[in-house]
Image: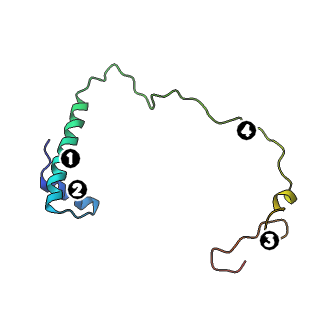
Amino acid sequence: MALTVKDVEHIASLAKISLTEEEKEMFSHQLTVILGYAAELQEVDTDDIPPTATVLPVRNVMRDDVPEPSLTQEEVLANAPDPVEGFFRVKSILGRPS
């Protein structure tokens, strides 16, 4: 299926991009070649190939969620530059003073 310059203009319009006449000609040829490759793939017999989501073995790579001892609140805040009542004080991002 050969794409015409008019087809490329339509695609460019949908993508909201502007193309020069040279680009329209170039993309017309390139897209025609790409669609030709896609048409070739459609001819491949895949009737005996089961549908699959991935060709890689599916395995869980996450570790078990095991609770472990954590730092105390004092240890966590030990290096905080300006802790307030057991919390981190951070710079305001909404324009209001902290």
Q: Residues within 10 Å of mark 1 (few under 14, many from 20)?
A: some
Question: Type of residue at label 3?
Answer: Asp
Question: Type of residue at label 4?
Answer: Asp
Q: Is residue 37 left or right of residue 69?
A: left
Q: Marks 2 and 1: in contact by CB < 8 Å?
A: yes
Instruction: List x then y, in percent, for residue 90.
Output: 72, 70
Tell me the quadrant of the picture where the N terminus can be found.
top left
- Distance in Å between CA atoms under marks 1 and 2: 11 Å
**Can you identify the residue that label 2 sits on?**
11
Of pointers 3 and 2, the one earlier in the residue sequence: 2
- Distance in Å between CA atoms under marks 2 and 4: 49 Å
Residue at 81% in and 63% down: 79
Residue at 63% in and 79% down: 95
Of pointers 4 and 1, the one earlier in the residue sequence: 1
Tell me the quadrant of the picture where the C terminus can be found.
bottom right
Instruction: Residue lying at the far top in this picture: please name it.
Output: 48
Closest to the observer, 93 or 47:
93
Mark 3 or 2: the one toward you? 3
Mark 4 or 3: the one toward you? 3
Secondary structure of the residue carrying tag 1 is: helix
Of pointers 3 and 1, the one earlier in the residue sequence: 1
- Distance in Å between CA atoms under marks 3 and 2: 56 Å
Q: Residues within 10 Å of mark 3 (few under 14, many from 20)?
A: few
Instruction: List x then y, in percent, for residue 8.
Output: 18, 55
Secondary structure of the residue carrying tag 2 is: helix
* Figure check: 71 above or below 95: above
Q: Marks 2 and 3: in contact by CB < 8 Å?
A: no
**Can you identify the residue that label 3 sits on?**
82
Q: Which mark is residue 31?
A: 1
Question: Type of residue at label 1?
Answer: Leu
**Can you identify the residue that label 4 sits on?**
65
- Distance in Å between CA atoms under marks 4 and 3: 33 Å
